[in-house]
Image (cartoon, rainbow, N blue to C red):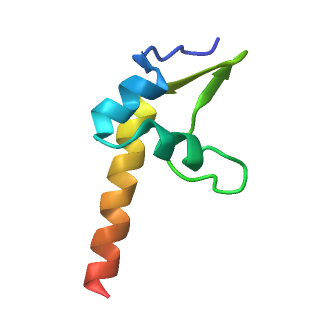
Amino acid sequence: MTDIVVTQLMTTEQLAEYLQIPVRTLEDWRSPRNNKGPTPIHLGKRVRYRLATVDAWLVSLEADASSKDAA
């Protein structure tokens, strides 16, 4: 049996507010040519982001910045 992890889902607009960035930036990041930013979930035509995934992505950005500063 698989454990189900339940975390809050956010719309693009909610995530943009959370990150304090424009919605357009998130839209650009998730385009196939960029493939940046946190991994989105596609529910039909709707796009959502797991809060836990976003927070993990932010932690990875901090780790990358720390490793570059140490080099």
Q: Residue at x 39, y 41 (%)?
A: 22
Q: Residue 12 location, x and y as percent? A: 47, 28
For image coordinates 62% across by 15% down, the residue present is 2
Residue 38 seen in this snapshot: no
**Residue 1 relative to residue 63: left or right:** right
**Residue at the (56%, 49%) spot, across then down:** 29
Q: Quadrant of residue 71?
A: bottom left
Question: What residue is at 31 percent from the left and 31 percent from the top?
Answer: 17
Residue 34 vertical position relative to residue 30 in the rendered view, above or below: below
Q: Please, is residue 28 above or below residue 4 in the view?
A: below
Work out whether residue 6 can be spotted: yes
- Which quadrant holds residue 40? top right
Query: Where does residue 23 sit, x and y in percent of width and height?
Result: 45, 36
> Residue 65 in the image: x percent, y percent?
32, 69
| Nearer to the camera, 17 or 52 | 17
> On the image, which quarter does residue 14 sit in?
top left
Q: Is residue 28 above or below residue 44?
A: below
